[in-house]
Amino acid sequence: MEPGDSTKQARAAAQLRKGVLEYCVLALMRDRPRYGVELLHALEDSGTLATSQGTVYPLLSRLRRDDLVTTTWQESATGPPRRYYALTDSGRAALDEFARVWPGFRDAVDGFLATPHHSTGDPA
C-alpha cells in the first residue's frame, strides 16, 4: 500500500457513507421504531457504515424536521426514557424511491469500475 492510500480510502468511504447513510437509517426503521443508540449499533455492526453520535443525531433531527420520521418517548427498563424514531408515510415513500433508484445507480457505478472507458471527446 502506498503512503496516503489509507487516507484516500477513508475519504472515499466517508463520501459514500454520506450519500447513503440517510436511507440506511430509514431502512433500519422500516419494520419497527428504533432509538438512536440502537441505530448506531446496527450501523456499527455493518462495518462499513459505522459512524458517530455526532453524525447520527443531527441526521435524525433533520429527518424529523423533514417529516420523514416521527418520535415518541418510551420508558426503558435499563435507564432513562428513550426517544424512538419511526418512519412516517413520507419517510416510507422516500425509502421506497431510493430502493427503486439504487439498483440502477449501483449497476452504473459497477459498470464504470469494471471496464475501462476511453474518452470520445476533447478534454475540457
Image (spheres, rainbow, N blue to C red):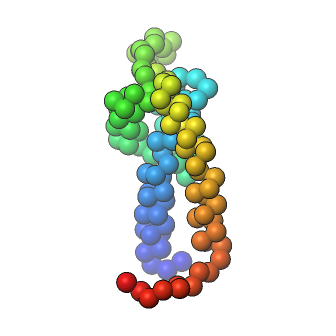
Looking at the image, residue 59 lies above or below residue 47 = above
The number of numbered badges drawn on the structure is 0
Looking at the image, residue 102 lies above or below residue 97 = below
Is residue 111 shown left or right of residue 21?
right
Q: Which of 70 and 28 is in front in this view?
A: 70
Residue at 59% across / 71% down in the picture?
A: 112
Q: Which of 114 and 82 is in front in this view?
A: 114
Q: Nearer the viewer, residue 95 or 80?
A: 95
Residue at 47% across / 73% down in the picture?
A: 5
Which quadrant of the view contains residue 58? top left
Residue 86 % position (x, y): 49, 24
Residue at 56% across / 34% down in the picture?
A: 28
Task: Work out which quarter of the rendered image holds the N terminus and state it.
Answer: bottom right
* Residue 24 seen by the camera: no
* Residue 29 seen by the camera: yes
Looking at the image, residue 119 lies above or below residue 52 = below
